[in-house]
Image: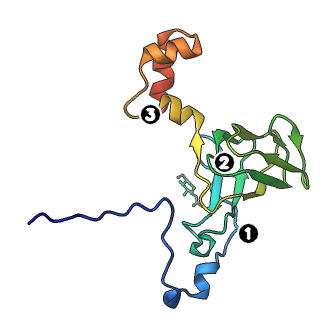
Amino acid sequence: MASVLLVVFVNGKICKDPNIISADDFFFPGLNMPGNTSNAQGSRVTPVNVNQLPGLNTLGISLVRIDYAPYGLNPPHTLPRATEVLVVVEGTLFVGFTLYPGDVFVFPEGLIHFQFNVGKTNAFVFAGLSSQNPGVITIANAVFGSDPPISLDVLTKAFQVDANVNIYLQAQFK
Ligand SMILES: *[C@@H]1O[C@H](CO)[C@@H](O)[C@H](O)[C@H]1NC(C)=O
């Protein structure tokens, strides 16, 4: 007799049984603490989305704190599912315009954007995101670090630079 295999795919998080939800599902502490910026980019994103705060599920909203060492960069990236509204708390950031404490900037959903600390001190921001699960695609990693790699013929024609330049760039994202 033939058996039927039922497989359900959920595009997002499944809802918890209401009987096992607790107040902790709606609580996340510690966003007053700076993220560790000791890395090649000199920046750290601390996310508070549905993965850290289950109570955000289905609500269409989340938050990040981003810390930047002096000259630290949050490299060009796009959020496939969220608009980002950012407020500078400390420091001076270049995002295409220069932002100072208290300045608010909005990056519309899907737009490639970055933040670069052009000040001599640490900087940090909070940013609201219009999705409980915004996603992130970092441009350099996606283009030069993909596995399997994008062929040199494609990169060479797309970027109009010598194949060796692309080989070099791919090596940075291995
Ligand atoms: C920050 O990250 C670096 C590199 O991973 C690590 O060596 C260091 O211990 C971390 N610092 C703290 C305070 O966690």
**In the rendered image, which residue does mark 2 sit on?**
43
Measured from the top left, where is residue 120 in percent x and y?
Answer: 82, 43
Could you give the CA–CA distance between mark 3 and mark 1, rounded to whole angstroms? Answer: 34 Å
Q: Residue at x 85, y 45 (%)?
A: 92
Q: Residue at x 61, y 64 (%)?
A: 49
Kind of residue at disc 3 = Ser
Q: Residue at x 61, y 68 (%)?
A: 58
For the N terminus, which image quadrant?
bottom left
Residue 123 can be seen, yes or no: no
Q: In this view, does 80 lie to the left or right of 12?
A: right
Which label is found at residue 82?
none
Kind of residue at disc 2 = Ser
Q: Is residue 58 left or right of residue 147?
A: right
Q: Is residue 14 left or right of residue 129?
A: left
Mark in front: 3 vs 1: 3
Q: Residue at x 84, y 48 (%)?
A: 105
Could you give the CA–CA distance between mark 3 and mark 2, rounded to whole angstroms? Answer: 22 Å
Instruction: Using the image, determine if residue 170 lies above or below residue 102.
Output: above
Residue 16 can be seen, yes or no: yes
Q: What element carries label 2?
A: strand
Mark 3 / mark 1, whichever is N-terminal = 1
Residue at the left extreme of this rendering = 1
Q: Residues within 10 Å of mark 2 (few under 14, many from 20)?
A: many
Specify the quarter for ligand 1: bottom right
Residue at the front extreme of this rendering = 1
**In the rendered image, which residue does mark 1 sit on?**
32
**Residue sitting nearer the eye, 49 or 132:** 132
**In the rendered image, which residue does mark 3 sit on?**
146
Kind of residue at disc 1 = Asn
Could you give the CA–CA distance between mark 2 and mark 1, rounded to whole angstroms? Answer: 16 Å
